[in-house]
Image (cartoon, grey):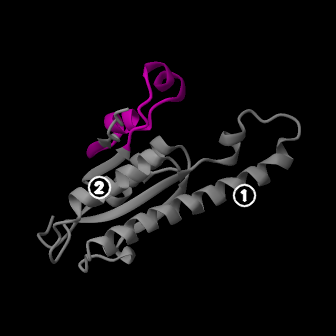
Amino acid sequence: MACSEKQVMVVGIDDSEHSSYALGWTLDHFFIPCASNPTFKLVVVHAKPTPTSAVGLAGPGAAEVLPMVDADLKKIAARVVEKAKEICIMFFLTFQIVCMQVNDVTVEVVEGDGRNVLCEAVERHHASILVVGSHGYGAIKRAVLGSVSDYCAHHAHCTVMIVKRPKIKR
């Protein structure tokens, strides 16, 4: 890699507070000290589920439901992307970072399962680091629902950083 070529960092986002926290944490820890030039090119990726995966096993009447489900999934994806852009804008404004603008952040919505979408984004962008948030599921929920972060840690061809929100003391 040439000295002037930036490494790519992919951040996976969904509609959870965990992924928003992970994006903010990543900006705080990797983009603050960019006095003149950030080290990484930032690519934010949202995996939009397919309508059929959201509906599950299609039965009678599924054909009528799928367009409505797809419209809802598109609205959710647009909301997720907008929130990610807002986080980036607020970060850049707060720290008056002039070396990077929100236009320097690539935001993608890719249809498919989050695990596969993120690993494919790593390959497509030749990423050095993949950042994902942790939902903090226990062993049973992880076994039933699956864990995107666990899958990516084992299958992504780069360093995978799993960002956990600090526990709130009560």
Which numbered mark, 2 or 1, is in the foreground of this view? 2
141 with respect to 10 (left or right)? right
How packed mark 1 is, by other alpha carbons closer than 10 Å (few <14, some 14-19, many 20 or more), is few
Left or right of 62 on screen, residue 150: left
Closer-to-camera residue (91/6): 91
The residue at 70%/54% (across/down) is 72
Determine whether label 2 and label 1 are within 8 Å by CB: no
Q: Position of residue 42 (x, y in %)?
A: 32, 64
> The magenta stretch spans which residues?
133-161
Kindly give the residue lying farthest to the right in the view shown: 60
Which structural element holds mark 2? helix
What percent of the width, then of the height, locates residue 151?
40, 34
Q: Could you tell me which quadrant the N terminus lies in?
A: bottom left
> Vertically, is 43 above or below 35?
above
Residue most extreme to the left: 3
Vertical comparison of 101 with 26: above or below: below
Q: Which residue is mark 2?
A: 26
Task: Identify the residue under disc 1.
Answer: 71
Type of residue at label 2?
Thr
Say whether residue 151 is magenta. Answer: yes
